[in-house]
Image: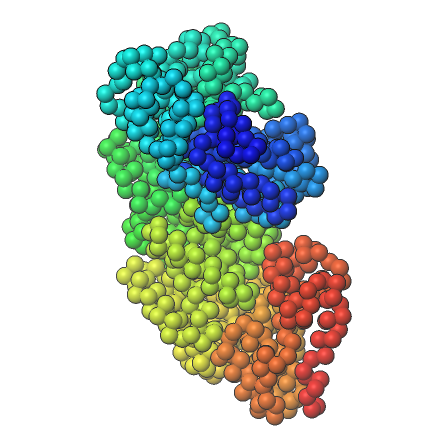
């Protein structure tokens, strides 16, 4: 549909004339002309019917005329649940494009044209951008997306990312959206072009051109009623009779605009033959334009040839390239559905359910829409569909399926169980914690005597996370588990999930008596799910975990590549926390965190951000630790998850304490103590103790540090069910030695070796050896232990603790009258502390260095790389890729890339090719410039 006023325009097309849109078309002309060189995206924003589709049609036509490859997809209101349907439209437009997509496994899996495990939206988006960039080498492209507010969730997540990555790819993206419509497509930050209503003069021009026989008074009335909406201007006359158009008969008295549009569509739809109307209803409720499904659903009543009458009046058209049916406008689709009687709609849904026999989830949804009476079989199918949705991380769809299943359940007990399940799934995936009481109240109304395990799970999640009521949540859940266990001979499928909830209650409670009850209840499970076992051993009581537990955890972490189940990702990720394995699950955790940024899967995002923040704290990436923790806190505040905020606040407290921001750290610790006291939340109280211990050590207040460490676990006697003891191992040894408790420090090391803690991770081996050095009375033994600690392979991944060990080593060497060696370690410690921003520790190391007769030098005076950066840069200089470096150092490729991004400017280079020479120039350390 082209503008008659445009130089290359034609006054009439099947869609009418684009009158009054010269500025809009000029904007599109500029955009399309720039696509081959710059790429980029633009969002066409306007109210329904304002002409967005017509403008997109014109942009597509002009892009085609310029030689661009145009790919199109349209969001469909009634198909918002189906995954990657819009992406499939784009990638299966032509045989050529389908073949190209089939060569990319990530894309082929996403759109169902190839086998494999599904990937997250970032991976799919990256693959699509690379494909588009490759295709643009021979022919620039334009993606045209209509009604993006109705894109399915999966496609929207991918395409919104693609829209932000097209700059310089030779591909553009133009999409149309409604300003107030709820959408999975996040258009924030994208360039927007707003389309407003036509002026009265332009409205009259349009009506006169398309309907020259309209009487002047009729034209004026239509202009007033349409209020500049082009779709209404084009459609309202079609709803009038010939006498009405010529003013020979009166016009209707008063119908609101939107109703008039519906009336116009209704008049045209009702004029169609009955088989055509039925075919349109099937197509509207099917939603994807898949004519094969439509054909199966209408078999015996009509055939696809009955589309012809609707095509002739431009209600629908079939794309010659894709073979898919498309409605001219979404309002036509809505009108088709609204005009059908409820029994007609239900009959069509039944037919579509039969047509989707190979896709259980689609079949379940259509059967559910077809039913008005309770139906236990359909409710069971919906419950299965909900489970599938939950495992792929689609919380809203899972909750919707469970609620609908409850409506179809024939018994009150089943309705109550399913509503409770919806409450639990909603809280754990969508983050809808505030919806839990309402859904549970509905469940109680359905069956006042119901005592379902899902209800206890949902209530416990609510009590734990909203109020921190650990003891009530514990009593409620253990009672429900025990009753269910005693009242049924058959295993309850919900029991492992209930025990997973109970485990987190025990973890926050942090008391051995809670864990004893958990173990008694879990002992009756056969088999115990692997994630539950790993959470109990590696997270619940890692000090007593066996070597086989850590091997199982490593295997589970490696298996998360491509995993979509948020529960599994987060449980394995949580189990990795105390054993220094979070680097193994970096990629899946970042996928979960990205969901929260997009407004999806809020609780998994909070948990992922908190775990990533903790990893950033221990690995020395403190600015990232602050950023991730603040993102988690923002989500906790917005969605009402106070309990989950303490992990992020703990990370912020530790970073603040280490950097010398003691006021912030103390304030955070004070709030932790205040909140945890009455709730008996020992885990949070121990968080506060670690923050206070970090403050005390930074200030040299070792007696206070010892007291705070003992709140977590006394040196020499690792407390049961206190994983945090592994985090403060070095703190415990140092504070014990500095306060004259050398025997306790020695017992601490002996207990660690007896428990095999030095075999869990390189960090724990490093700090165990360092603690032995601190506790040693013989200087030679101490120096040997420090040397062994610093030689542990992979120790550079924990730069803060490594720098502290260098400080201790330098102190001991100075006291043994080896100042030259002491200077080397003290200078390295200062470099690391300066890079970290750990000012109090840099001052301590500087004081020791001055005692060696050398002034401490500022990091700003020379090229400084952390030990880990030296290692990464050295491997990169040898030609290793980021992935290969990450495999050697147990880092994610993303972390390796971040380090190299920091290394290049320090060395004054811009590429890997220059690394070898730059490292050679920088390798002569300051220590060689110092007197012997």
Q: In this view, does 456 lie to the left or right of 176?
A: left
Name the image quarter holding residue 340.
top left
Tell me, yes or no, if residue 622 can be seen here. yes
Q: Is residue 248 left or right of residue 847?
A: left
Q: Is residue 52 left or right of residue 292?
A: left
Where in the figure is residue 595, as x and y percent of width and height? 47, 46
Where in the figure is residue 673, as x and y percent of width and height? 33, 66
Where in the figure is residue 152, as x and y percent of width and height? 48, 34
Q: Is 500 above or below relative to 290?
A: below
Residue at the location (27% across, 18% down)?
251
Residue ranking furthest to the top:
300
Q: Is 545 above or below relative to 737?
A: above
Tell me, yes or no, if residue 429 can be seen here. no
Please give the count of numbered marks on the rendered protein: 0
Point out the image quarter for the C terminus.
bottom right
Where in the figure is residue 812, as x and y percent of width and height? 59, 85
Residue ranking furthest to the bottom:
853
Q: Is 419 above or below relative to 461?
A: above
Between 896 and 760, the one nearer to me in the picture = 896
Residue at the location (65% across, 39% down)?
140
Residue at the location (36% across, 67% down)?
668
Residue at the location (48% across, 37% down)?
22
Q: Is 638 above or below relative to 916?
A: above
Between 882 and 67, the one nearer to me in the picture = 67
Image colouring = rainbow
């Amino acid at each position: 549909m082209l503008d008659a006023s445009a130089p290359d325009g034609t006054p009439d097309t099947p869609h009418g004339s684009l009158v009054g849109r010269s500025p809009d078309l000029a904007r599109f002309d500029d955009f399309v002309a720039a696509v081959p060189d710059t790429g980029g995206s633009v969002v066409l924003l306007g109210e329904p019917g304002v002409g967005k589709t017509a403008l997109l049609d014109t942009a597509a036509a002009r892009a085609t005329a310029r030689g661009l490859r145009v790919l199109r997809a349209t969001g469909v209101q009634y198909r918002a649940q189906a995954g990657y349907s819009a992406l499939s439209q784009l990638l299966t437009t032509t045989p050529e494009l389908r073949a190209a997509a089939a060569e990319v496994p990530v894309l082929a899996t996403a759109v169902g044209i190839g086998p494999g495990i599904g990937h997250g939206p970032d991976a799919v988006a990256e693959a699509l951008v690379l494909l588009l960039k490759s295709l643009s080498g021979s022919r620039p492209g334009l993606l045209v997306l209509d009604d993006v507010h109705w894109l399915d969730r999966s496609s929207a997540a991918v395409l919104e990312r693609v829209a932000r990555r097209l700059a310089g790819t030779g591909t553009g993206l133009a999409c149309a959206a409604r300003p107030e419509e709820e959408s999975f497509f996040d258009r924030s930050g994208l360039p927007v072009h707003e389309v407003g209503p036509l002026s009265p003069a332009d409205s009259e021009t349009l009506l006169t051109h398309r309907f020259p026989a309209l009487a002047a008074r009729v034209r004026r009335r239509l202009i007033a009623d349409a209020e500049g909406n082009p779709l209404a201007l084009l459609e309202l006359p079609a709803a009038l009779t010939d006498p009405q158009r010529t003013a020979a008969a009166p016009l209707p008295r008063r119908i609101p605009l939107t109703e008039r549009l519906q009336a116009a569509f209704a008049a045209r739809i009702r004029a169609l033959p009955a088989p055509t109307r039925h075919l349109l209803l099937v197509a509207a409720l099917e939603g994807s334009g898949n004519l094969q499904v439509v054909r199966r659903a209408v078999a015996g009543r009509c055939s696809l040839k009955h589309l012809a009458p609707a095509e002739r009046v431009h209600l629908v058209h079939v794309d010659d390239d894709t073979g898919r049916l498309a409605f001219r406008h979404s309002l036509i689709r809505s009108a088709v559905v609204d005009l059908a009687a409820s029994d007609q709609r239900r009959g069509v849904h039944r037919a579509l359910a039969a047509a989707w026999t190979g896709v259980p989830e689609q079949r379940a949804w259509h059967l559910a829409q077809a039913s008005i009476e309770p139906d236990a079989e359909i409710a069971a199918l919906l419950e299965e569909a909900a489970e599938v949705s939950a495992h792929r991380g689609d919380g809203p769809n899972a909750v919707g399926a469970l609620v609908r299943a409850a409506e179809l359940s024939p018994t009150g007990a089943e309705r109550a169980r399913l509503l409770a399940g919806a409450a639990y799934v909603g809280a754990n995936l969508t983050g809808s914690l505030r919806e839990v009481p309402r859904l549970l109240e509905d469940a109680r109304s359905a069956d006042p005597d119901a005592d379902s395990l899902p209800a206890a799970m949902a209530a416990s999640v609510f009590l734990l996370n909203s109020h921190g009521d650990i003891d009530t949540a514990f009593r409620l859940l253990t009672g429900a588990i025990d009753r269910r266990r005693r009242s049924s001979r058959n295993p309850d499928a919900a029991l492992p999930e209930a025990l997973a909830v109970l485990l987190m209650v025990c973890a926050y409670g942090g008391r051995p008596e809670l864990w004893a009850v958990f173990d008694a209840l879990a002992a009756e499970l056969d088999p115990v799910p692997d994630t539950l076992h790993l959470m109990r051993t590696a997270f619940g009581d890692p000090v007593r975990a066996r070597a086989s537990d850590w091997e199982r955890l490593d295997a589970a972490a490696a298996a998360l590549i491509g995993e979509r189940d948020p529960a599994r990702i987060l449980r394995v990720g949580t189990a990795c926390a105390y054993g220094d394995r979070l680097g193994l699950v970096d990629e899946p955790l970042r996928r979960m965190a990205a969901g929260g940024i997009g407004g999806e899967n809020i609780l998994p995002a909070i948990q992922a951000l908190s775990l990533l923040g903790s990893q950033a704290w221990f690995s020395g990436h403190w600015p990232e630790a602050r950023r991730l923790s603040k993102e988690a806190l923002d989500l906790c505040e917005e969605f009402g998850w106070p309990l989950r905020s303490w992990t992020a606040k703990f990370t912020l407290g530790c970073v603040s304490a280490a950097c010398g921001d003691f006021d912030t750290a103390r304030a955070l610790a004070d709030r932790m103590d205040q909140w945890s006291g009455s709730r008996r939340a020992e885990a949070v109280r121990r968080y506060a103790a670690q923050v206070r211990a970090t403050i005390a050590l930074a200030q040299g207040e070792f007696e206070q540090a010892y007291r705070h460490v003992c709140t977590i676990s006394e040196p020499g006697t690792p407390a049961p069910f206190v994983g945090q003891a592994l985090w403060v191992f070095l703190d415990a040894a140092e504070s014990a030695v500095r306060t004259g408790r050398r025997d306790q420090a020695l017992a601490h090391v002996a207990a660690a070796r007896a428990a095999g803690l030095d075999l869990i991770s390189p960090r724990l081996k490093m700090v165990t050896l360092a603690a032995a050095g601190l506790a040693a009375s013989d200087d030679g033994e101490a120096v040997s232990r420090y040397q062994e600690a610093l030689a542990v392979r992979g120790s550079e991944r924990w730069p803060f603790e490594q720098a502290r060990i260098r400080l201790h080593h330098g102190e001991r060497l100075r006291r043994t009258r080896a100042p030259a060696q002491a200077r080397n370690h003290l200078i390295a410690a200062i470099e690391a502390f300066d890079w970290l921003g750990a000012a109090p520790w840099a001052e301590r190391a500087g004081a020791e260095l001055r005692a060696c007769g050398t002034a401490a030098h500022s990091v700003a005076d020379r090229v400084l790389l952390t030990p880990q950066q030296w290692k990464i840069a050295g491997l990169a200089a040898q030609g290793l890729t980021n992935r290969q470096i990450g495999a050697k150092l147990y880092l994610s490729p993303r972390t390796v890339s971040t380090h190299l991004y920091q290394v290049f400017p320090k060395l004054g280079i811009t590429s890997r090719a220059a690394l070898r020479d730059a490292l050679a120039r920088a390798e002569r350390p300051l220590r060689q410039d110092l007197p012997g």
